Image (tube, grey):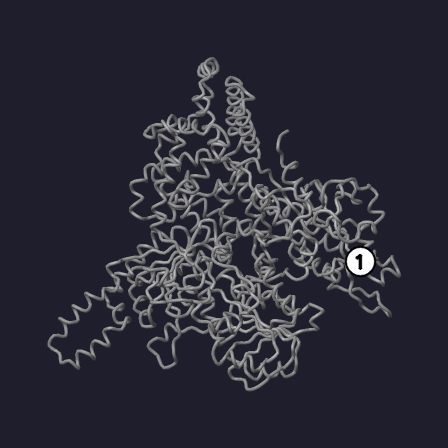
Amino acid sequence: MAFSESNTVEAYLHDLLAGPAKHVPANVFQQPKAIYGRSHGGLGWHRIAAADIPRQTQEVLVEPWVREALIRLNPEISADPELADQVLYKLRAIILSVRSDGLIRANEEFTAWLRGERSMPFGQNNEHVPVRLIDFDGLANSLDENHYVVTQQFSYRAGSTERRADLVLLVNGFPLVLIEAKTPTRVAVTWVDGAVQVHDDYEKFVPELFVCNVFSVATDGKEYHYGSLGLPVKDWGPWHLESPSSPTPLAGDGSQLKTVKLAVESMLRPHVVLDILASFTLFATDKRKCRSKIICRYQQYEAANKIVERVLAGTPKKGLIWHFQGSGKSLLMVFAAQKLRLHPALRNPTVVIVVDRVDLDTQITGTFTGADIPNLEKAETRDRLQQLLAQDVRKIIITTIFKFGEADGVLNQRHNIIALVDEAHRTQEGDLGRKMRDALPNAFLFGLTGTPINRIDRNTFYAFGADEDDKGYLSRYGFEASIRDGATLKLHFEPRLLELHIDKAAIDAAFKEMTGGLSDLDRDSLGKTAAKMAVLVKTPERIRRVCEDIVQHFQSKVEPNGFKGQIVTIDRESCLLYKAELDKLLPPEASAVVMTVNANEPERKLFAHTRDEEERLLDRFRDARDPLQLLIVTSKLLTGFDAPILQAMYLDKPLRDHTLLQAICRVNRTYSEQKTHGLIVDYLGIFDDVAKALEFDDKSMAAVVSNIQELKDRLPEAMQKCLAFFAGVDRTVEGYEGLIAAQQCLPNNAVRDNFAAEYSVLGRLWEAISPDTLLGQYAKDYKWLSQVYQSVQPSSGHGRLIWHALGAKTIELIHQNVHVDAVRDDLDTLVLDADLLEAVLSNPDPKKGKEIEIKVARRLRKHLGNPKFKALSERLDALRDRFESGVLNSVEFLKQLLQIAKEVLQAEKETPPEEDVDRGKAALTELFNEVRTADTPIVVERVVADIDAIVRLVRFPGWQDTLSGEREIKKALRKALFKYQLHAEEELFEKAFGYIRQYY
């Protein structure tokens, strides 16, 4: 029996969720009391076939179940069941509004209803009372009155569009979780295909199905990932929490499905799904006024719940949480504060968020504000903090540790005050921490840090670590886990210009010679001054050479991939010296200084910025299209600064311990598929001994920073693994003969995917090491492998994890070596020559068939997006698969291939030259109509006309295949969008460029 998607992963998940299959009566919904609460099999979900669920395919909700839940959970509706119709009318209206109001807005409103945050005038004298759709009260003791159902192949139809989800989890008739399962037996198909199906297809074409969605899941039986509405697939996260032992032992420890089993058992239990809905879901507004949905990562879920459990237990009254830099500590504090505030057993507590900055303008404050957390107060002064605590305000209070330093005595003795303290190690062990404890003597104190804790400094553990906790941590999410989960990136370090490192022996000798004629006293005085590091590193010659090296490195290695850099200098004077030198090498707008300027320094007023001005400057830096590429700093922006586009830090300042780690972690944020790592370029030898420089309590620190030399050592083996696929192939043969010989070594999908996997490893190494001179000896082979890789890359886009986008340097290498001979296309002559056709069919040479197939595929790629040619392309893919699987012999394959070739030529003759561009204008018109809002009242026709006119002017035949062509078209597009102030919308720019690339 064959292994299929439905009988492997889908069936396995179904049994995990509901237990082994057993017959359930079709009329079970008429006996709802039989399925209240959780089932006794699996994880607590009742198995009901989709055909037995009382709904039509055009209905999202299972209305009989919803109605019954309303009557069961609401005394007012129980007394008058007809009131349920009024609630159902409201819920239907939200679903119907999704296409006009947008999916996020509709989901936010429905989420409020599911949480019981909406009311109806059902009380006495039409008094409004909350309406309960779900019973959250009984979750803790499993006595809730909810109706939990899992079903397969859940269909929904909107008009003529119908989609079918593999698995859906319903609570009281509301489809809360959608699961897409993919086959584990095809290398080219992964969980990514399921996630893309949800994100790019289902959410777009049947948005009604997601109006009450909490999250979606995609799995291929090997990996498990989940995401919320609208979340890009690259950001879908894993779930690695430990789970209780499954009551359904379907997989032993050696099973490939074990990872997925543990994730399902942990995340998809009914009480966890509802906990995420109630306490771990946010709707936030970013600086561009875009609304988005955010749900927790597993480490945030675990840590927040541990905080809540400790507060409920009442002891110990402290805890230390270490979650690595960049892994979402700000959101963890939001989730914890939200759940603490809403927990009924805590009797309306006060949650104090304590940051270690002088002012409250922090990332944490911005996260709370952007998420619209209710009952939020900022205590920006000592008097305001004292007033809020003295008045016993029961809200979330954000303040700084320094405000406690200004306070005297006890401010509040209540026991249900919970303080969440940011960066616990930095300011909490001294007088400030003591004064905070004096002010809140009975409060719970939880310290959160993004950097490891130094064991030598035991005060941190004394302040927040509880004896009951393993190694002193209540929750720990370290370097390796963060990198494994894709929450942060690895850091590579690169020592540069070793001859510019401080050579103490040479300096001592030069100093002795220089001071030979001085008195001992003068020599000592001069020596103390010259010995200061700042003097040594600020010599004009050194600064000039370092700046030259930074520019060369940045322009060759960082800028081509669309990333930006940060230069860390030793002091404020160095910032200005670096700026002056960089302005000789780059346009002045390419760099900016961010530093503190005092009022008594008029000579530096040019670099003084107000808070708003500085924030606008940093927003420009985050904008990929803004010319600002390098920030020059000394102390500012080394902690708390979040700019995912930042990849390279040029470090010319001696840093150690927590300060060093916090600084270098500015570059570890995820950004795009091209950003595979952060890069630290070291000009002072700080990383000459990584272990010594970073003496923290966790040995896994070594995993965070990997030397470029290690990557260089791995390159030869990776290259040989790729070349091994082509044993016996003469790589000097050019044109189609050489390409066909290479492709014949990759005869089927399995071999091609194995090659793709090895090439992916090689490609990542190449991009990370480039432009090191070591690559020169491998460049010829790498170019050849890259061209072969590109020639067999599937056009359908399946297997997105393996068949990834080529790196910028790789593409450039390919384009530099493309010759006219290799890309000639004489398909027209070939197909129309009757004698040739007869000769081919009478003597079916596989090489000739492969050559024709390549030429047909190339012609089809010229018409991407045209429905006529898309159908022909799909026929070609299907024909190739049938031939490779042995269904067709060579003669039949050639006959059908030549028939497709003839139809391609005929379609080209019938397609007017401007038709592609007309479709391009239509696609652009649809795109700009989608983004037009009251805040951007653009005239769509004018925008599209401007873009069309300027692109036509700049484009040239084959521009899509050259870096210079792409660069010119992008410049033209930016120019057109800038006119309408749309140039800063990154997603809009990328979509528009994609349409232009496809249709122009």
Q: Is residue 984 visible?
A: yes
In terms of depth relative to the viewer, which is nearer, 848 or 221?
A: 221
Which residue does the image show at 43% across and 36% down from the upper left? 789
Query: How far across and how far down the image is residue 709, in percent?
Result: 33, 50
In terms of depth relative to the viewer, which is nearer, 424 or 541?
A: 424
Q: Is residue 365 visible?
A: no
Disc 1 marks a residue whose amino acid type is Val
Residue 743 appears left or right of 152: left
Query: How far across and how far down the image is residue 117, in percent?
Result: 73, 64
* Number of marks drawn: 1
Quadrant assignment, res 298: bottom right
Residue 294 appears left or right of 59: left
Q: Residue furthest left?
A: 517
In terms of depth relative to the viewer, which is nearer, 643 or 219?
A: 219
Quadrant assignment, res 299: bottom right
- Seen in the picture, residue 571 relative to 54 is either above or below; the reply is below
Residue 463 appears left or right of 264: left
Query: How far across and how far down the image is residue 490, in percent?
Result: 44, 54
Q: Mark 1 — residue?
A: 87
Q: Residue furthest front?
A: 467
SS at badge 1: helix
Residue 814 appears left or right of 380: left
